[in-house]
Amino acid sequence: MKHHCPLCAADADTFFKDSKHHFLLCPTCLGLFRDSNQFLSVESEKERYLHHRNDMEDKGYYQFVLPIINQVKLHMTQGAKGLDFGCGHTPVLSNYLIKEGYGMSVFDPIFFKDESVMNVQYDFIVCCEVIEHFYNPAYEFQKLFQTLGPKGKLICKTHLFEVGIDFDTWYYKNDPSHVFIYQAETIRWIKNNYLLQDVKINQRVITFSK
Ligand SMILES: [Zn+2]
């Protein structure tokens, strides 16, 4: 069976396969995507996300989201309007950004499903450890860039696959809810395909500029 890349639709071949994980490598955008036969049910996905810790009092979690907060502060003046897309069961990142003076809306396909927030345009959108969960990245990025106002920023945190990482033993691909893994080339493909002005990659933080 042929597998089509869910980001750019090219035909892709197996990159890695063992008893638990099957990933394909797209020859066009260099995205690595999980065989859809391995996708979790909505129930087990929700179960997993409920165990994700994100607690306002948790110093570790603050450090985890700090690179995103820093990017927002670098590019946006106080009062700018933001969307926390894929905020999880507790929108902690949004709460930190509200404390910094930003106006925040939240969306999560499992926990905060109010689609009406997607009908507004935002100055910036944050996606903290979200884009690797996209079953249909072409659809999701299209929607995100539509929701972003002129000169808006989409700030994402994810772990890119790069030279030096041993995929076979890599923790990031072992999470069964991680279904699309990006390389730096994939990020540039997105920037070009969606006709964005710019993209900057700073370790795990990616800032797209419209
Ligand atoms: Zn592709």
Image (cartoon, grey):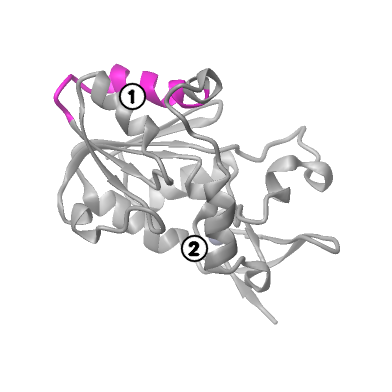
Label 2, label 1: how many angstroms apart (C-alpha)? Answer: 35 Å
Q: Residue 169 at x, y = what percent?
A: 83, 43
Residue 37 at x, y = what percent? 67, 73
- Res 10 label: none
Secondary structure at badge 2 equals loop
Q: Is residue 73 magenta?
A: yes
> Which callout, 2 or 1, points to the residue nearer the camera?
1
Residue at the image point whose x is 31% and y is 58% from the top: 113
Label 1 sits on a secondary structure element that is helix
In the image, what residue occupies the spot 77% across and 32% down? 164
Q: Which mark is residue 8?
A: 2
Answer with the quarter of the image where residue 140 lies.
bottom left
Asked whether mark 2 lies closer than 8 Å to ligand 1, one says yes
**How many marks do you count on the picture?**
2
- Position of the N terminus, as image quadrant, is bottom right
Q: Residues within 10 Å of mark 1 (few under 14, many from 20)?
A: some
Which one is nearer the viewer's eye here, 153 or 157? 157
Q: Nearer the viewer, residue 8 or 39?
A: 39
Up-down relation of residue 57 to residue 210 (above or below):
above
- Residue at (58%, 46%) from the top-left corner? 182
The residue carrying mark 1 is 96
Name the image quarter holding residue 141: bottom left
Q: Taking the image as four quarters, which one is ligand 1 found in?
A: bottom right
Residue 23 image offset from top left, x and y in percent: 71, 60
What residue span does the magenta drawing correspond to? Answer: 64-80
**What amino acid does circle 1 point to?**
Tyr
Q: Name the spot of residue 4 as percent of width and height, x first.
A: 58, 72
Instruction: Assess whether residue 93 is covered by the magenta stretch.
Output: no
Give the residue type that dot 2 points to. Answer: Cys
The kind of secondary structure the magenta stretch mainly shows is helix
